[in-house]
Image (cartoon, helix red, strand yellow):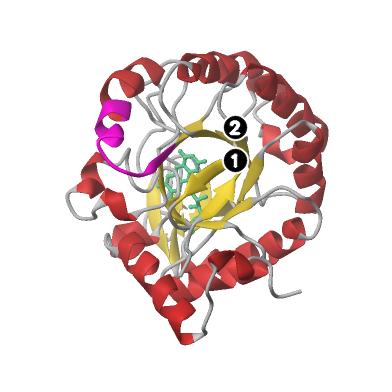
Amino acid sequence: MNTKVTLAGVEFKNPVTTASGTFGSGAEYGELVDLNLLGAVVTKGVANVPWPGNPTPRIAETCSGMLNAIGLQNPGVDVFIERDIPFLRQFDTRIIVNVCGKTTDEYIETVERLGDTDVDMLEINISCPNVKEGGIAFGQNPKAVEDITRAIKAKARQPIIMKLSPNVTDITETARAAEAGGADALSLINTLTGMKIDIERQTFALANKTGGLSGPGIKPVAVRMVYQVANAVKLPIIGMGGIRNAADAIEFILAGASMVAVGTTNFTNPYATAEIVQGIEDYMRRHNVEDINDLIGLVK
Ligand SMILES: Cc1cc2nc3c(=O)[nH]c(=O)nc-3n(C[C@H](O)[C@H](O)[C@H](O)COP(=O)(O)O)c2cc1C
């Protein structure tokens, strides 16, 4: 049975990875999950300098999911290179580094610093607020997506995955823009903007007022978007949004994802990633599937 998939020339032992920001940079979860079992680890977002993140409270539970407004708190690329890459390199898994920035130059500075390191791919989070555009995320405007993709691709030494925002009217427009800009792969979806009000305190549940909705409740939206994008562009896709188990992962693969990422579920079941690797193999055995690649985009 073959569970190997290849994205942009990089081979993964299986299609299961972690969603950025939900698995630390591997060390915390490495005590619970054998990272050697995973196709890849996607790190939390890293910027050119340390970011303090947003004021608290910055997470809130919702029906079948959660809202977060962490604000991409991170220790900066220098600490990341010194501390996190050597840790992850001990394992037989691919490393995908998630990159964030407030200007194109900030993204490029981080991408260039990572260029000399031993990481396999870069995932560019274009849901970060773009200060030059008054805080609107790069990922919400197709022209901005194409421009930033082209600018990063010109400097990147590793293949780049553009991570798309679902907070748009037509996600195929931003997907096509990333493809036109030279992206090697796409990942989707990031969180959906939401709000929760604490009626006892009569104020917002999050200090940031709004936050990103994630977890099982968003899965049908994510599957729909993966299907649309898979049928609009030629690039390979990492699908995510509410995946809890192997059945959910298979849904994304049948919709057109070459890989899947597990996010919010890590908080309720820290073993989920390893269980999903096993569950996909069980599914393949039950359905006499010899090669996982035969399942990608099977449902038309
Ligand atoms: C607490 C938290 C932190 C996150 N941090 C990042 C991040 O740093 N960069 C990024 O691209 N996405 C980030 N995300 C989005 C996830 O990677 C993922 O796209 C989204 O949560 C949908 O998947 P899920 O429903 O399985 O969590 C974060 C999500 C959560 C819940």
The residue under label 2 is 159
Q: Is residue 115 above or below residue 247?
A: above
Query: For the residue labelled by badge 2, is the local secondary structure a helix, a strand or a loop?
Result: loop
How far is disc 1 from disc 2 in space, using C-alphas?
A: 9 Å
Query: Quadrant of residue 131 in the image?
Result: top right
In the rendering, at what x and y percent does residue 234 appear? 77, 50
The amino acid type, in three-letter code, at marker 1 is Gly
Q: Is residue 292 magenta?
A: no
In the rendering, at what x and y percent does residue 128 appear? 58, 32
Query: Quadrant of residue 182 in the image?
Result: top right
Q: Earlier in the sequence, mark 1 or mark 2?
A: 1
Q: Is residue 66 above or below residue 300?
A: above
Discs 1, 2 touching: Cβ within 8 Å: yes
In the rendering, at what x and y percent does residue 14 appear? 45, 57
The residue under label 1 is 9
Q: From this viewpoint, is residue 141 visible? A: no
Q: Is residue 92 magenta?
A: yes
The residue segment tinted magenta is 85-95
Which quadrant does the N terminus fall into? bottom left
Compared across the picture, whether 229 is left or right of 275 comes to right
Residue drawn where x is 38% and y is 67% of the image: 276
